[in-house]
Amino acid sequence: MGLTSMTGFADLAGNREAASWVWEARSVNGRNLDLKLRLPEGLEMLEAPLRAAFGAVLHRGSVSVSLRLGQGVRRTVQTLNLDALESAITAALAAGEAASRRGLDLAPMTAADLLGQRGVLEVAAPGPAEDPGLMEALAGQAPVLARALAEARRAEGMALGTILEAQVNRIAELAARAREVAGARAARGADGLAARLEAVLGAALTVDPDRLAQELAILAVKADVTEELDRLDAHVMAARGLLGAAGPVGRKLDFLTQEFNREANTLCAKAQSAELTSVGLDMKVVVDQLREQVQNVE
């Protein structure tokens, strides 16, 4: 399957009758799965299907999901208020009678006149939650949007995997180079220790040669980097295995980068030669780059 990144983007549009909408989902790295929802007022009931859909396909990452509704979703509905209509008719009749008693003839009222009275015809814009069909359509797109984001993260993970593989290979090359340099340093060091031992024994016959040889051997052990290089080789093998594994491996890779860094630091501390120090510093740079990229792996 390869790696999955925690970075990705997906959008999804939909419509139903006169209604339209657009979903957007964005993801960045995060310690755990953190789903942030930005939904229009009144659509809180969509939260449960969204959390279920994204939780089924994602394991880690900070995910933001937003929904924008089109104007058609807010269509208006007109309702006749019968009580207000009855009051308007009663008032119109009373006004006509009062005018007639004073000798005035009022023009007859039309239906349009009555409907134009305040409160007789109520205009309302029901929320989208009051449309069961619309809510079903929106909730039905939650798994589609989640899978689209997961696919975008997998595509990003493929590119990320290529970068990480190259960095792990570079660490392996530097570890091999460090082994060569350390071997050459050990050979030179043995000759140097023998020469210094002879010089010391020649200058001070009171020095116990066995004790001196023991101290020099201790120094040689402290400068030995074989264990560090062996552990680096083991970490490289483990990293390569994780890069080809299925499922979320980001935390394991992050732990390995800490181990890589520890061994590189020890290598530099024990180097005792400019060439080996240079190799160790180069390795630290690559490990830092690796650690930065691993933060995006799910």
Image (spheres, rainbow, N blue to C red):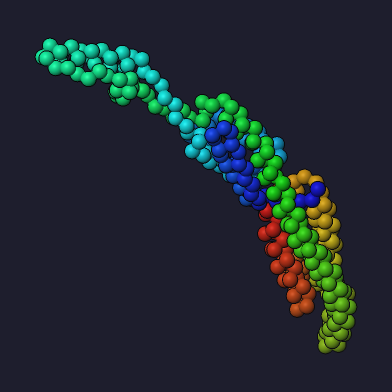
Res 197 seen here: no
The number of callouts visible is 0
- Give me the residue at 72% from left, 63% from top: 287
Examine the rendered structure and indicate whether residue 200 appears above or below residue 57: below
- Residue 235 position by quadrant: bottom right
- Residue 283 position by quadrant: bottom right
Residue at the limit of the structure toward the left, as seen here = 102
Examine the rendered structure and indicate whether residue 163 appears above or below residue 128: below
- The percent coordinates of residue 12 (x first, y second) are 62, 42
Res 169 seen here: yes
Examine the rendered structure and indicate whether residue 296 appears above or below residue 129: below
Classify residue 105 as left or right of residue 168: left
Residue nearer the viewer, 165 or 121: 121
Residue nearer the viewer, 20 or 146: 20
Classify residue 278 as left or right of residue 123: right
- The percent coordinates of residue 227 (x first, y second) are 84, 63
- The percent coordinates of residue 10 (x first, y second) are 64, 47
- Give me the residue at 28% from left, 14% from top: 89
- Give me the residue at 33% from left, 14% from top: 83
Residue nearer the viewer, 233 or 90: 90
- The percent coordinates of residue 276 (x first, y second) are 78, 74
Residue nearer the viewer, 99 or 82: 99
Examine the rendered structure and indicate whether residue 9 appears above or below residue 53: below
- Give me the residue at 23% from left, 13% from top: 93
